[in-house]
Image: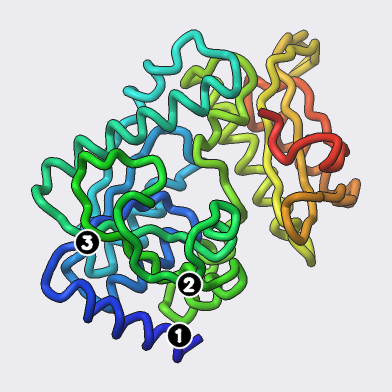
Amino acid sequence: MKDFIESQIKQIREIVGSDKVLLALSGGVDSSVCAALLAKAIPGQIFAIFVDHGFMRLDEADEVEEIFSKYDINLIRVNAATRFLNKLTGIVEPEKKRKLIGEEFIRVFEEEATKLGKIPFLAQGTIFVDLAESGGKHGALVKSHHNVGGLPESLGFERLIEPLSTLYKPDVREVGRLLGLPDALVDRQPFPGPGLAVRVIGEITEEKLDTLRQADAIFREEIEKMPETPDQYFAVLTDTFSVGVKNGIRTYDRVVALRALKTTDFMHCELVRVPYETLELVVSRITAEVPSVSRVVYDITPKPTATMEWL
């Protein structure tokens, strides 16, 4: 992988020269490794736009900003949580949530990009699987702008830079480590683009998001103490209420569902048999530490028949 890094650095320098590059930084593994590689190749020439839509996990947006503040890139964090939340007012249908979030992300990205003036290059953390699934040209470092997925052509990018496009996920993680990214980011589990918005059942509110963030953080903290960590694990805030008792007082609060799965391809996923001791500790902590949760359940449905996410 060291040879790969040096080869990509050389190619990026030859292609970009003294021009600027725009990068959509999500905080996920692929875009983060891409950012680190670009920073090493062309320091100071990268403008990374990180759209914080308000659906990140607990403290995640701040962690992303802190990590990349140490790299020689121009990081632009757009705090758009209120904007996205307003856009989703009254929306309960999952696919409509996804589409609205995707459209709004494009609008925010477009607004921020136009403020920067003419930038000829757009970089993406595309990996081999992305290209294979979309029928793209395998192994292409640079492709014409019509292949920019989802972003409006009116932004006027001349070329698309995809330095990770020949790699699979394990290779991308190795490159990230060699570039000095922290393990917490490099080993981060997959996270949907719409974030917690697709892990809140029903209408999304700030109160629901805060509840889910707390419950999810507790679950992840305890799961990560296991000798072998599942491939994906998270909490879901259901739209169900349940009677409970806290401090001798009857409550009627929300039900949280937990999910942990193992997989090799994310097409077929198997149940992770989390030890009862761990589950008992998680349930005890969530019901004690998260005021608006009265009950916790564990989802043991594999994929198929269920999908990885609930929505």
User: In the picture shown, does residue 89 fall above or below 126?
Assistant: above
Query: Marks 3 and 2, Cα distance to the nearest angstrom?
Result: 20 Å
Q: Position of residue 236 (x, y in %)?
A: 68, 31
- At 24% from the left and 38% from the top, the residue drawn is 110
Label 1 sits on a secondary structure element that is helix
Amino acid type at mark 1: Phe
Q: Residue furthest left?
A: 117
Query: Marks 2 and 1, Cα distance to the nearest angstrom?
Result: 13 Å
Q: Position of residue 175 (x, y in %)?
A: 49, 77
User: In the picture shown, does residue 164 fall above or below 204?
Assistant: below
Looking at the picture, tell me which residue is in the foreground, 303 or 220.
Answer: 303
Residue 255 in view: yes
Give whichever of discs 3 and 2 has the lower sequence position. Answer: 3
User: In the picture shown, does residue 218 fall above or below 1?
Assistant: above
Q: Position of residue 247 (x, y in %)?
A: 75, 18
Label 2 sits on a secondary structure element that is loop
Q: Position of residue 208 (x, y in %)?
A: 55, 21
Q: Tell which tag, 2 or 1, sits nearer the viewer.
A: 2
Looking at the picture, tell me which residue is in the foreground, 224 or 172.
Answer: 172
- At 37% from the left and 80% from the top, the residue drawn is 8
Tag 3: Cα neighbours inside 10 Å, few (<14), some, or many (≥20)? many
Q: Which residue is mark 3?
A: 21
Q: Which residue is mark 2?
A: 139
Label 3 sits on a secondary structure element that is strand
Amino acid type at mark 2: Gly
Residue 284 in view: no
Q: Tell which tag, 3 or 2, sits nearer the viewer.
A: 2
- At 80% from the left and 15% from the top, the residue drawn is 244
Give the quadrant of the C terminus. Answer: top right
Amino acid type at mark 3: Val
Tag 2: Cα neighbours inside 10 Å, few (<14), some, or many (≥20)? some
